[in-house]
Image (tube, rainbow, N blue to C red):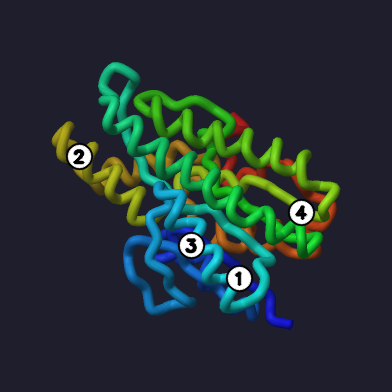
């Protein structure tokens, strides 16, 4: 039977790379996103709305009969300290980054329990492990996802369900370029100079690529990683080892 993978935010960046990797590996892949895509099977879904997430999961079960891998990737970024973060910004970021993952897992886990198996991968960040300046809300959200992976792993191990977080560092995605563009607009800095500076901050001396993250996600979700659960898998060019 063909295995089924669900990816949120699979239309761009890391999510798209993950979607493409699982398609290449022979999975039937469903993409829950607000931005349409012709890759995989697209379902329009706002992950910050619990009813939409539940309906999307029900649709996948109706079509495919199972969900083997869930990759919770949808998220937004905000560069701001706590005083600069408005209540509206905070609520929006948390509703997508944290609530979206919560709604997804809550909808999927009953089916995985019936299956007696499944692999959940939450896309965290190097900020799941360390703090960064001007990143109050985003850092908080990624720390929450690390906790979600650990507690879900413990609660559902008896059902053969694994949960892990893959924690990328600086990866060249549309989200990365948007953050750099916003910084340059505010500061007047040159984008090429900022990009080179970001690369120099990584011990390996470069920015990571979405396909590299997708390779790690595919491994963690696979049977080759059957004894790995509740872990935070860092892929950051050595940044958090400093």
Q: Secondary structure at mark 4?
A: strand
Given residues 13 and 240, the one toward you in this image is 13
Disc 4 or disc 2, which is closer to the eye? Answer: 4
Mark 4 and mark 3: Cα distance apart in space? 22 Å
Mark 1 — residue? 61
Left or right: 168 as drawn, with respect to 172: right
Q: Could you classify mark 1 by the number of other residues whose Cα lies within 10 Å: few (under 14), some (14-19), or many (20 or more)?
A: some
Mark 4 — residue? 161
Given residues 170 and 201, the one toward you in this image is 170
Contact, CB < 8 Å: mark 4 with mark 3? no
Which mark is first along the chain, 2 or 3?
Answer: 3
Q: Residue furthest top?
A: 83
Residue at 56% x, 71% y: name it: 60
Which mark is first along the chain, 4 or 1?
Answer: 1
Instruction: Point out residue 125 in the picture as x, y percentages from the top left corner.
Output: 52, 41
Mark 3 — residue? 55
């Amino acid at each position: 039977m063909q295995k089924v993978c669900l990816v949120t935010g699979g239309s761009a960046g890391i999510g798209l790379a993950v979607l493409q990797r699982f398609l290449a590996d022979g999975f039937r892949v469903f993409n829950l996103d607000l931005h349409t895509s012709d890759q995989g099977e697209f379902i329009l879904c706002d992950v910050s709305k619990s009813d939409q997430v539940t309906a999307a999961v029900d649709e996948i079960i109706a079509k495919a009969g199972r969900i083997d891998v869930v990759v919770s990737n949808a998220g937004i970024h905000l560069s701001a300290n706590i005083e600069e973060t408005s209540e509206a910004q905070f609520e929006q970021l948390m509703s997508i980054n944290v609530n979206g993952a919560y709604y997804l897992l809550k909808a999927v886990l009953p089916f995985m329990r019936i299956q007696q198996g499944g692999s959940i991968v939450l896309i965290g960040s190097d900020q799941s492990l360390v703090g960064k300046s001007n990143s109050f809300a985003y850092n908080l959200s990624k720390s929450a996802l690390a906790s979600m992976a650990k507690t879900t792993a413990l609660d559902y191990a008896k059902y053969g369900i694994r949960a892990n977080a893959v924690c990328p560092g600086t990866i060249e995605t549309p989200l990365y370029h948007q953050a750099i563009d916003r910084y340059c607009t505010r500061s007047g800095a040159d984008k090429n100079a900022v990009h080179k500076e970001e690369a120099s901050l990584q011990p390996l001396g470069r920015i990571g690529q979405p396909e590299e993250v997708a390779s790690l996600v595919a491994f963690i979700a696979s049977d080759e990683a059957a004894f790995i659960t509740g872990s935070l898998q860092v892929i950051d060019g050595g940044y958090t080892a400093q």
